[in-house]
Amino acid sequence: MFTTLAASAEAQFREKASTFLALAAPADSEAAARAVLAKREKLHWDATHNCSAWVVRGGIRRANDAGEPSGSAGAPILAAIEGAGLTDCIVIVTRWYGGTKLGVGGLVRAYGDAAAQALAAAPRRIGVEAARLEVTYPYAHTAAVMRALERAGAEQVEHGYADSGDAGIVLVSVPHAAVEAFTDELREGTAGAVTPARNGEVVLYRNADP
């Protein structure tokens, strides 16, 4: 289970004539994060800097100062993401230099504050890693299969039937934490006749805000 962003948000402020515009956006892979960054750089081609950081599941963390002094931009942006307890997200802070130098300390505060404000403005959602399972069952065991699905909190349920016409097929997403119990209940409820087969991995989301 992890917390991420449900949608993008922006925050903007000025510091000693420099304008800082931060974007916080969901990104579930490095490729997605790089695509968001490339789009932002194209949009704000006239900016002095487009500094960024992202955190992606699997322990992937990146920070880019984009021409600012080393550690003055990417690191505080990354710290804001980690401080918010978020993953699968990117924050880009665009700066238009106003002619007055802020110093490394001033840059760290400005980039960190901009990132934190954008993250605070973005809605959250909870992600749960789940297995995509395929269950083929004789129609005589339909009731037992449906009970097991309900107790496991299965989502993304798709019903079908075997080509032979003598069995049903259901594709479901079950949280990893519930897969073992779901499998055991299927076997026990059908006297060993039904066992789910893995058919990929997915993420289930729910709103994290009130």
Image: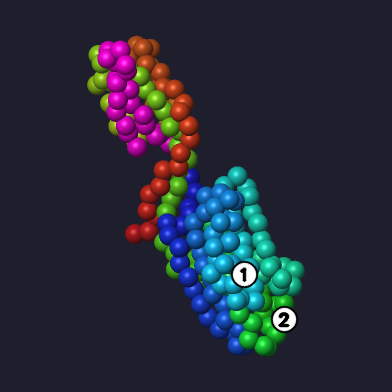
Q: Residue at x 59, y 67 (%)?
A: 41
Q: Is residue 207 left or right of residue 166?
A: right
Secondary structure of residue under mark 1: strand
Residue 188 located within the stretch drawn in magenta = no
Q: Residue at x 46, y 39 (%)?
A: 202
How would you rate the neighbour count of disc 2 (Cα within 10 Å): few for under 14, some for 14-19, many for 20 or more?
A: few
Label 1: which residue? 50
In the displayed orientation, state which residue is furthest to the right: 70
In depth, the one of 118 and 160 nearer the eye is 160
Q: Residue at x 63, y 50 (%)?
A: 60
What's the distance in space between the residues labelled 2 and 1, CA to CA?
Answer: 18 Å
- x%, y% of residue 42? 57, 67
Q: Which mark is residue 103?
A: 2
- x%, y% of residue 176? 47, 34
Question: Which quarter of the picture shows residue 63?
Answer: bottom right
- x%, y% of residue 189? 32, 17
Amino acid on which the number 2 mark rests in the picture: Gly
Q: Quadrant of the C terminus?
A: bottom left
Amino acid on which the number 1 mark rests in the picture: Asn
